[in-house]
Amino acid sequence: MAPAVLIMTLVTFYPLINSFLISLRAWDLTKPQSGFPFIGLANYLHVLQDPAFWQSARITAIFVLGAVSIEITLGVALALLLNRDFKGKNLVRVIALVPWAIPAVVNGIMWKWILNPAYGALNGVLFSMGIIQNYIIWLGNPKTALFMCILADTWKETPFIMLLFLAALQTIPKDLYEAAMVDGCGSLQSLFRITLPLIRPTLFVALSLRTIWALKSFDLIYTLTAGGPAGGTSVIGYYTYLKAFVSLNLGRGAAVAYLMTLVIIILVILYQRALYREDINQ
C-alpha cells in the first residue's frame, strides 16, 4: 500500500501541485534574473484579458462540438451495424480499428498529404467526379482548414467510440429485443426504448473521454495546420503551447492549462446531470 501511495504522489499529485504553484508565479524563462516572484492570480487575469485566448476558446468550442457530435453519432451507427451477424464481420471490425491505431502525428502528416492543393488525393477524387472544377487549397482558408481538422480527428477517433459502443451492445440480452418484437415494437422504437437507455453509461464515458481529448488536441493541429491560417485553427492546446514553449512563459502556460481543466470538470458534471437526470431526481 505504502509504495503505491508514494508512486501516486510522485507521478500525479506532485506535478499537479507544482504546476499550480508555477501558474501563481511570474515564471518567465526569458527573465531568469527576476527570480520568478509570486504574483497570485495575475497570470489568470492576463490570459482572460487576452483576445487571442478568447479567439482560441471560440475555435476550440467549434472543434469540440463538431468532432465529438459527429464521432458519437458515427460511432453508435457503426456499432449497430457491426453488432449484426454477417459474413466476415471479424475482419471488418479489425479493419475499422486501423485509423485509431495510427499515431496522431502520423495522422496529421497523412491528412496534410491528402489535402495538398497540388497532388492531394481529395482534390483528385473530387475533380475526377466532377464535384469541383478547380483544385481547392483546403488548408488555406480558416473555415475549410478547421473543417478539415474536424474531419481528420473524426477519421482517427471514431473507431475507438465504435469499439466502446460495440462492447456495450453485446451486453444487452437478445431476449429484450425478442420480447419487444412480440409487443409490436419496430426497430426505431427498440433503439430508443431498449438500446440507448441501456448503453447510457457507455455514452457518458464516450462523451466525457472524447470531450477531454478534443479539448486537449494539439498534435493533430500542430502537424496539420500549426494553428493557421491566420490563427483559424489555433485551439486552446496550441495556444497553451505558444505561451509555455514558444514565449517561454511557463506561468501563463500553466494558467491556461488550469483554466482548461476547470472547463473540463464543469462539462463532465453537466454530462452526468444530463444523462443521469432521472437518477439524480430520485
Image: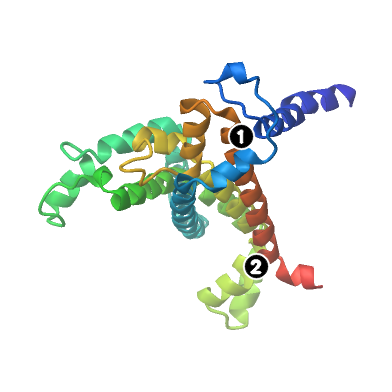
Instruction: Sort mark 1 into few (<14), some (14-19) or many (20+) by Cα contacts within 10 Å.
Output: many
Within the image, what quadrant is residue 102 found in? top left
Specify the quadrant that holds the C terminus: bottom right
Amino acid, disc 1: Ala
Q: Secondary structure at mark 2?
A: helix
Report x, y in % for residue 81.
Answer: 47, 58
Residues 114 and 175: in front is 114
Tell me the residue that label 1 is attached to.
254
Q: Give left or right: position of 211 versus 156.
A: right
In whole angstroms, how far apart are the C-alphas of marks 1 and 2?
Answer: 39 Å
Q: Is residue 172 visible?
A: no
Residue lying farthest top? 33
Residue at x-position 89% and y-position 24% = 2
Residue lying farthest right? 2
Tell me the residue that label 2 is attached to.
197
- In the rendered image of this protein, does residue 256 appear above or below residue 60? above
Report x, y in % for residue 20.
Answer: 70, 34
Within the image, what quadrant is residue 185 found in? bottom right
Q: Give left or right: position of 182 versus 218.
A: right
Specify the quadrant that holds the N terminus: top right
- In the rendered image of this protein, does residue 246 appear above or below residue 192? above
Residue lying farthest left? 133
Report x, y in % for residue 42.
Answer: 63, 40
Residue at x-position 26% and y-position 35% = 113
* In this view, the mark in front (1 or 2): 1
Q: How many marks?
A: 2
